[in-house]
Amino acid sequence: MLQAINLHKKFKTKEVVRQVNMQLEAGESVGLIGPNGAGKSTTISMLSSLIIPTSGDVEWQGASITKNPESLRKVLGIVPQEIALYPELSARENLAFFGRIYGLKGPTLNERIEEVLQKIGLTDRQKDIVKTFSGGMKRRLNIGAALLHKPSILIMDEPTVGIDPQSRAYILDTVKQLVEEGMTLLYTSHYMEEVELLCDKIYIMDQGAIIAYGTKDELKSLVSDNQTIELKARILSTIFESALIDQFPKATVRKEEDLLTITMPKSEEPLATIFAIAANNDVMITSAIVKIPTLEDVFLNLTGRALRD
Amino acid sequence: MLFSLIGKQIKMLIRNKQPLIILLVMPIVLITILSLALAGIMDNGAEEAIQARLVLVDESTWEQEKVTIQEFLEKEGITGPPLEALLTQIENNNPIQILENNILASNEIEKYISVEHKQPKDLDTIRQDKEVDGILTVRPSFRLNYVKSAYFDKKVEPNLDLYLSQENEIRASIIQSVISEWQYGFTQSLALSKAGLSIEEVMENTKRVEKVEQVLEDHEREIPSSIYYTVGMLVMFALYVPAFLAGFALQEVQWKVYDRIILAGISSTLYALSIFITGTLVALVQQIIMLSYGKFALKIEWIGLEGMIDIVLSYSVFVGGLAALLTTLQFRSKSDGILNAFTGFIVSIFAFLGGSFINIGDISETLANIGDFTPNGAAMTAILSIQKGQEIAVIWPYMAVLYGYVSLCVLLAIVLFPRRGVTV
């Protein structure tokens, strides 16, 4: 288990991280979200033993890593936000170098390189120089370089920044697969949907502090217990509105031109009923959107600011 | 691990155009331009080749003298087979034969003296030729007179004329030393041959080579512009090796590759050591390329191999140490400010004081003395001293300066190198 206990980091007079407590259990996938400058990268650097906290501690398997980081480093894979690769070397040369510095050599090294290249989908481009790669390919190789020594904990810092949707989907699939294979994951991003897709537990960070944590549902429940349904139809009659209110007495219905917004408790499963009522009242629904609160809404609710501000 | 780090750093250097241009192309271009442009001012007619040109003018030949020698021997009562045997021995062992076939044709002497044969009628023309360093004229009856004095103790002297040119003192001295030794040898042989010692044994080569080397040591060789600027650019551009390596190291930090290296368990000491060794190797290769360019393209004859190896190796070690120190300072400052100051200011000052562009001693003796305390200045003065033909002992004070800098760089790098990760 990797644990951050009251982590605090000050650069000169600036407090970058304040009293952060986090916990990663084996096989767990944990998300750390927050806007740029929230202190995520500094927290990750302290968790991975690269910088020493001003106060507080990081414990791996119950022992402090501040003075003895080697035991953690052996099992840790890091995917930094930057493309931590040598652009003048080929993909294979990069992997070979990172493999060698972890002590891999000979057939074992070659075998691992092949496995990793296959996992990140770059087998065909292994001999190409990295600087000729697209952003997505570089990101994939950036992940590959962290996987060579078969780490049991993977820390990924914004691994999909600035890439096309296709590469992003590929990376997310790869990470999901790693999680399914039992990898312990700490994933930071300001893309909420990525964290929602990959992580069981989420920490929300702002201005150097953890402002909330829990499962997705636990966090969303902080915002609201209601759900919102937006309906569009060719002709919206008042009879249809009345029928809906009769059927869902706890709901509130608001009409704006051809848009009908219904707010009701999350516990109800309304869509089938709504379509049945529409059919009985000769209303042709053209679109129906069930709006569930997002982590973005949670952040907005907690800080009063949007996550990407 | 260490080899992986060194190999990666060398690959980064090789695969970037800018380092290749600055470390190799620029110095070669500058060496060529400065050597040619300033040859008229610096060379003063001095030639860098130390091979002397000797013209041998034999006013007689064995065939011409054989008849008179045979007549003399018959007169002395030697006939039949003993006469034939003695004639054969004289033909093979007379001093001219030994000079041409054994001494001047030997590998050791051939390096220092090239020989041409000319006719007596060409003597006047040859004397006008400023490229000729010496003319040895063998007078008629030389062989006969030698036989008379060597075998029959007659009071006649075999006559030779040695003309030495005043154009190049070193080359003339080389010829003089070899011919004097040869003359001394065959004069001795006149006496020793009677004691049963063969003339060849008396006139063995070793002493003559020593004499030539002594001549080279006694005379300072003129330093032409090609040697001056090859050395000047070599020591100056080697200073860019640490700049590139430290620049790459800072990039590694900025790209977070350094974090990966540290997380992989590579100690900061091993990383700094890899920079030190890479710097040393790259500087060594760079200097070898520059010296080879001088040798093959500019026809420079590098002399004093032992001293040159000592200096080039020591300067390479200094470059390695400087690379480790610059990397350390960059990691400490977390910016390329120090690197910019080094390449933009310090290298220029060092190059000026060290004399890479002009002989600073021509401007000020004090500045030249200060220049000898810069690492590049010390290396340059040491190399030029060796190239002037001075003894190897002359380089030791400069080596002390270099190793002083090496110690300082390494010590500071050890003390200041960040032990943990570096954040930017």
Image (spheres, grey):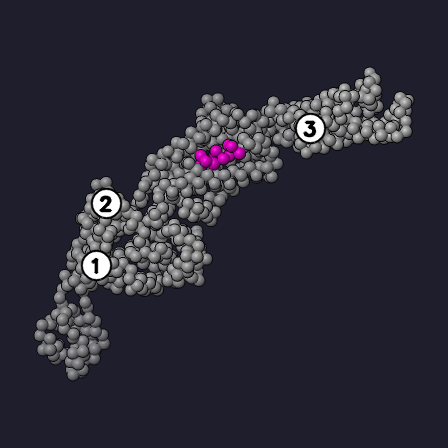
In terms of depth relative to the viewer, which is nearer, A183 or B385?
Answer: A183
Question: Disc 2 or 1, which lies upstream in sequence?
Answer: 2
The one nearer the camera, A115 or A230, is: A115
Q: Which class describes the residues within 10 Å of circle 2: few (<14), some (14-19), or many (20+)? A: many
Marks 3 and 2 sit apart, C-alpha to C-alpha, by 77 Å
Judge from the rendering whether residue A120 lies leftward or rightward of residue A207; answer left or right: right
Select label 3 or label 1 by which is in front: 3
Q: Is A238 one of the magenta-colored residues?
A: no
- Mark 3 to mark 1: distance in Å? 90 Å
- In percent of width and height, residue B103 lies at 72, 29
Q: Amino acid at mark 3?
A: Asn
Q: Nearer the viewer, mark 2 or mark 1?
A: 2
- Above or below, A75 against A239 in this view is above
Give the residue type at disc 1. Ile
Q: Secondary structure at mark 3?
A: loop
Vertical order, B3 against A217 (above or below): above
Q: Position of residue B111 (x, y in %)?
A: 66, 32
Give the numbered dot on residue A53.
2
| Residue shown at the point (46%, 22%) measured from the top left | B366
The quadrant in which residue A254 appears is bottom left
Question: Which chain hosts label 2?
Answer: A
Judging from the image, what secondary structure is the residue with disc 1 in?
Answer: strand
Q: Residue at x 16, y 69 (%)?
A: A228
Q: Are marks 2 and 1 on the same chain?
A: yes
Query: What chain letter is assigned to the residue under label 3?
Result: B
- Give, as a single range, the part of the protein colored magenta: B309-319
Front-most of residues B348 and B259:
B259
Give the CA separation, mark 2 to mark 1.
Answer: 22 Å
Residue at image x 33%, y 52%?
A: A82
Mark 3, mark 2: which one is toward the viewer?
A: 3
The residue at which mark 3 appears reads as B205
